[in-house]
Image (cartoon, rainbow, N blue to C red):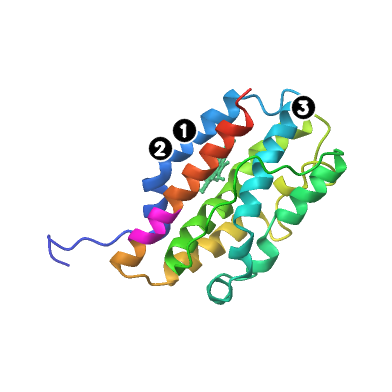
Amino acid sequence: MTETTTLAQPLSRRLKTETQAAHEGLDSRIMESRPFASLDRYALFLGMQHQFHRDIQALYADPRLAHLVPDLAARCRLSMIEADLDDLDLQPSQTMPAVDLSDDLATRFGWLYVAEGSNLGAAFLIKEAAKLGLGEDFGARHLAASPEGRGRQWKTFQAALDDADFDEAGEARVIAGAVAAFQRVQRLAEDAFAA
Ligand code: HEM
């Protein structure tokens, strides 16, 4: 190895770095809105989650992504969010028009990164939800770990990202997709907690 040789960072690492500020902004916006202060506040959070996961539902049925990401269909959490709404006698509402998802595989992978990564933060959120009497069997099903565990599920996803072998332009589109997804969730959070 010469002095000028640099090892390229894996895409999963680049994504984390490039979206860190967006994640921190979103995390603060949500937690400042005290989503676990009461069931009424939690309902706003659940509505936001529902809208985002409905936006991206098609990703989990995309055969091109399914070819790359193990157990893709089983990762979809929309039906769990619907069960959570049902537990709490809430109706799904759509306060913002659905997003127009790109057909581009790289862009879609970026959106999927945001949804799959959010399952890590859910380890913390489900503990907060427990203070409201909610959990993996009632009201906060969508925040539960998968049977294989959050860590393993995330590692498998990161490996799929890194093994997809996008070229530089493709990686840029994955990152742009992730940034767009974070912007979308940020807007949904602003909308849900506007009051
Ligand atoms: C509401 C408060 C939130 C908190 C407190 C939170 C917290 C966290 C924490 C602690 C991690 C890192 C876990 C680890 O490395 O083991 C994480 C990762 C992540 N979260 Fe959040 N999160 C929140 C909301 C969200 C939301 C709403 C989204 C997107 C919809 C999101 C997307 C992500 C992503 C993509 C990662 C993976 C970062 C990476 O390692 O590449 N988070 N979150």
Q: Earlier in the sequence, mark 1 or mark 3?
A: 1
Q: Magenta part of the protein: which range?
A: 172-177
Q: Residue at x 47, y 33 (%)?
A: 25
Residue at x 43% of width, y 57% of height: 12
What is the number of the mark on residue 25?
1
Q: Residue furthest left?
A: 3
Q: Amino acid at mark 1?
A: Gly
> Can you give x and y, in whole percent of width and height, for residue 2 in the image?
13, 65
Q: CA distance from mark 1 to mark 2?
A: 6 Å
Check mark 3 vs ligand 1: CB closer than 8 Å? yes or no. no
Under tag 1, what secondary structure?
helix
Question: How many marks are shown on the rendered structure?
Answer: 3
Which percent across, then down, holds residue 194? 60, 26
Is there any visible trace of residue 10 in the rendered image? no
The residue tagged 3 is 40
Q: Is residue 147 magenta?
A: no
Residue at the disc numbered 2 = 21
Going by the numbered disc 3, the residue's amino acid type is Asp
Label 2 near label 1: C-beta < 8 Å?
yes
Residues under numbered marks 3 and 2 in contact, where contact means CB atoms less than 8 Å apart = no
Count neighbours of disc 3 (C-alpha within 10 A) and say few if under 14, some if 14 to 19, many if 20 or more: few
> Which label lies toward us, 3 or 2?
3
Q: In the image, which is nearer the foreground, mark 1 or mark 3?
A: 3
